[in-house]
Image (tube, rainbow, N blue to C red):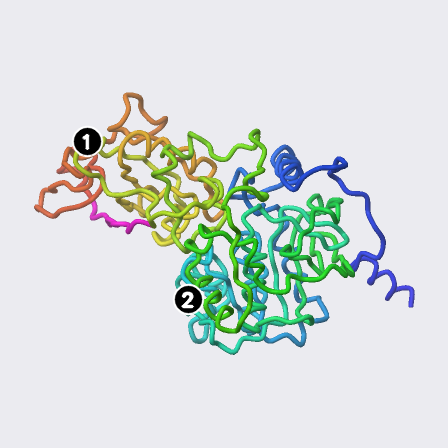
Amino acid sequence: MKVFCSYTYARFALSKMDAVIQINRGATKWDIRKKVWDYIEANNLANFPRPVHNRIPNFKGAHGACSKVSELQVYSRTKEVKVDPDKPLEGARLTVLQAKKTLLVPTPRLRTGLFNKITPPQGASKEDLRVCSTSQGVKDFSVPIGLDAKVKVDLIVVGSVAVSEKGYRIGKGEGFADMEYAMMVAMGAVNESTVIATVVHDCQVVDISEELIEIHDLTVDYILTPTRIIKTGCTHPKPPGIVWSKVDADMLEKIPILKKLRALEQEAGKDVTLKKSPEGGERASRPRTEPRSDPKRDPKGPSERRRPKEGQPEEVAARRGGGGGGGESVLEPRAAGQAPVTTVYLGNIPAGVRVSELKSALREREAVPLRLTWQGAQHRAFLDYAGQQAADHALAALEGLSIHEHTLQPELAKSQRGDRRPGQAHRRRPKTSANTAAATPDNTTTGAAVTDKPKAKRPTPKRKVENLPPS
């Protein structure tokens, strides 16, 4: 009996623990978010992507916390699990796939629908499932689920910026998790028995006043951390469905599936009157001191910002300007009159890395080039950007990028600067209009740098040139 009690205490928190981050009385949601983000950054508690501000933090230990999903009582009887696309929830998505349960992942930013069902390849290996659990895998191995699909979700796993032991949750401020749940209510995919769990670092468990929780806010039943499973016993009601008085015309325009749901509910005789003014509310009251963009990482003006490609973490758009609308591109092809192409050298690429892995990392870091010249055998790649400003943005975004536990080396290519990389032979880029092709001795077109060594000594190997579509 003593052993059982000890295990129960270790796995399920039975008593309240003091919060690491102290929240002042009267703090707003944005006050709490900023405190959590600042604390995680100051104590180096997060992995890529950094900084964590305006994101669901990808905290260290997230994979271990995610594995606790399988320890929940509901997990053994659940068939369909919805897990948000946030980076720190990759471990939860992998756990669900390994258990051969149906994994549903919301479409990033709800732009093209509500759900994607992840369909791993037949006979998928553990590595295949790991790939399927990533943002790129969600894009490559999924099929959309329509509003008329008969879906019954037993367990939902969401990301959070902060959560209280009472089950009160704060996201990054865009309301997508709340809206997703409300839409699931509207389509009959969830009910009062559906369990909500969130995965966070221990420091993200803070005191949150009930006064901050509104009718549309999603609360949680379980909190999974690297050290604890907390059963909240939350009695606050879950969102009853879409609260149309909280939806404005701008949101309706950005989320096409919301229009369909509104039409269906209007036909059913429900009040679907929208919020009269897009102003006000939590987003409008964001403190002016809260940085909404980083000029070094966001060189474009507000009218030129682009939303990230669908496979990207939803937090990118928040960092770039609060999730505004717009086109699909992050970087667009050069037009007449724009700055010439500027090339970034990316070195220290470990052996075995596939170009698709690098492309996925570039999309996640919002550093998609006009063209990628791949030289995996030489452990390097060259990235062409539309001018110096775009290249500077990419250099800042790629700082600290690690693949297969190797930190990559981003810097301006030799042809773009006057100094020399330490320990590297002098390299020069071919002088062509696109800066990506040159004639070799056998008249074969390649897409990479040509060495200065005499041609007779070492002919230039063939390189792989990647034209990346705008993300």
- Residue kind at label 1, given as amino acid type: Asp
Please identify the residue farthest to the bottom as the structure is shown. Answer: 150
Q: Is residue 231 visible?
A: no
What residue is drawn where x is 54% and y is 75%? 151
Image mark count: 2
Q: Estimate the spatial distance between the alpha carbons at disc 2 and disc 1, rounded to whole Å.
A: 43 Å
Q: Residues within 10 Å of mark 1 (few under 14, many from 20)?
A: few
Rendering coords of residue 410 (x, y %) = 38, 35
What residue is drawn where x is 71% and y is 37%? 27
Image quarter (top left, top right, bottom left or bottom right) of the N terminus: bottom right
Judging by the rendered image, the residue that carries numbered circle 1 is 452
- In terms of image quadrants, where is residue 433? top left
Near-viewer residue (1 or 426): 1
Near-viewer residue (329 or 129): 329
Near-viewer residue (180 or 461): 180
Figure check: 92 above or below 211: below
- Residue kind at label 2, given as amino acid type: Phe
Figure check: 243 above or below 438: below
Judging by the rendered image, the residue that carries numbered circle 2 is 141
Q: In the rendered structure, does residue 146 fall within the stretch colored magenta? A: no
Rendering coords of residue 166 (x, y %) = 77, 54
Q: Residues within 10 Å of mark 2 (few under 14, many from 20)?
A: some
What residue is drawn where x is 20% and y is 41%? 436
134 with respect to 226 (left or right) = left
Q: Magenta region, mostly helix, strand or loop? A: loop
Magenta-colored span:
461-471
Q: Is residue 469 visible?
A: yes
Near-viewer residue (88 or 219): 219
